[in-house]
């Protein structure tokens, strides 16, 4: 993860955007396929380990799911290592959404908006707690 954090923020953001767009268009992919696509658009990261972290980050965001299947890497720098096949979750979701009726789309949007409101309330509550804790810390610092 440290390697990922050392990568330029601009590259990380662009790579994640490219990976999301690629996942929307491809139900499955090899790491090599996206590597070639991404490197042609924004160049290589500062360290090869960043590629793996890019995919695990996408997995944590629920964009991709790693399969149990591996294939030999085409990348000459990988020295005949294997690479995983990844399944796109966003592509499947996009396909499922395209099958919804307008009424089902409206219901889905309403459910998402309700969840968003609940999340905003939780964020407000947590921000209030943070402000209270900061105030307590400041008063303790002044007393010390």
Image (spheres, rainbow, N blue to C red):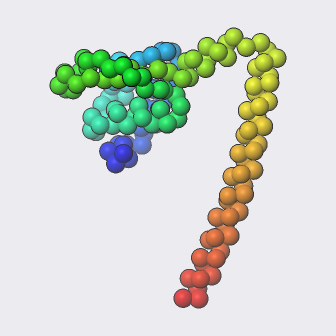
**Above or below for 64 versus 100:** below
Identify the residue shown where x is 30% and y is 17%. Answer: 71
User: Residue 21: in sight, yes or no?
Assistant: no
* Image location of residue 50, percent across then percent down: 33, 37
**Above or below for 76 versus 4:** above
* Image location of residue 128, percent across then percent down: 71, 63
* Image location of residue 47, percent across then percent down: 27, 38
| Residue at the far front in the pictured view | 68
* Image location of residue 74, percent across then percent down: 24, 17
Labels in figure, total: 0
| Residue at the far right in the pictured view | 103
Q: Quadrant of the N terminus?
A: top left
| Residue at the far bottom in the pictured view | 143
Is 41 or 31 nearer to us in this picture?
Answer: 31
Q: Quadrant of the C terminus?
A: bottom right
Q: Is residue 136 left or right of residue 67?
A: right
């Amino acid at each position: 993860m440290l390697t990922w954090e050392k990568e330029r923020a601009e590259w990380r953001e662009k790579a994640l955007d490219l990976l999301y767009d690629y996942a929307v268009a491809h139900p499955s992919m090899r790491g090599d396929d996206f590597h070639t696509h991404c490197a042609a658009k924004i160049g290589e990261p500062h360290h090869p380990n960043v590629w793996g972290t890019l995919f695990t980050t996408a997995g944590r965001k629920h964009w991709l799911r790693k399969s149990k299947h591996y294939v030999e890497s085409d990348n000459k720098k990988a020295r005949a290592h294997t690479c995983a096949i990844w399944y796109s979750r966003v592509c499947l979701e996009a396909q499922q959404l395209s099958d919804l009726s307008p009424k089902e789309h409206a219901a889905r949007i309403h459910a998402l908006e309700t969840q968003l409101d609940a999340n905003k309330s939780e964020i407000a509550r947590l921000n209030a707690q943070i402000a209270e804790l900061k105030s307590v810390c400041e008063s303790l610092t002044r007393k010390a």
